[in-house]
Amino acid sequence: MINLWATRNEQFKQLTWNLGTTFNWKVLFLPVRGRGNVIAIAFAESVDTYSMKVLRARAKQLDEQYQIEFIDFIKDIKRNNGSVLKRVIKA
């Protein structure tokens, strides 16, 4: 996991390319609402593919426990990662 500044476009493109090639394109991006930064979450090749159903249930638990918008994080990850999402998360 890394916090990237998306406002520096060329540097951002290079960093995302480097992450993609290093982690076989198993990288998800979570833009931070109202900010210019993006959280990149990279997965090792040996990491299992997660179920969206399981992730939503866990996000709901964490949301209730910590009052942090984990459910919104899942929605934003899904919205912003298109075809890459299926490399890491099952439908």
Image (spheres, rainbow, N blue to C red):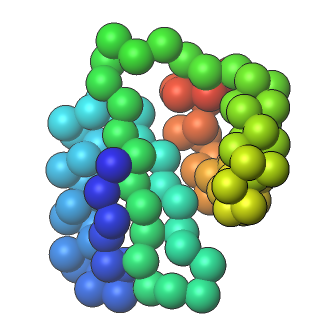
Hey, which quadrant is residue 49 in on the image? top right
Hey, which quadrant is residue 46 in on the image? top left
Side of 8 where 50 appears, left or right: right
Q: Residue at x 59, y 37 (%)?
A: 85
Q: Residue at x 30, y 57 (%)?
A: 2
Q: Is residue 91 visible?
A: no
Q: Is residue 5 visible?
A: yes
Q: Residue at x 19, y 75 (%)?
A: 11
Side of 81 where 48 appears, left or right: left
Q: Quadrant of the C terminus?
A: top right
Above or below for 63 versus 86: below
Above or below for 56 versus 15: above
Q: Nearer the viewer, residue 54 or 18?
A: 54
Q: Nearer the viewer, residue 8 or 69?
A: 69
In the rendering, at what x and y percent does residue 43 appear?
A: 37, 31
In the rendering, at what x and y percent does residue 17 appear?
A: 25, 53
Above or below for 78 versus 55: below
Side of 82 where 39 appears, left or right: left
Q: Residue at x 41, y 77 (%)?
A: 37
Above or below for 21 versus 6: above
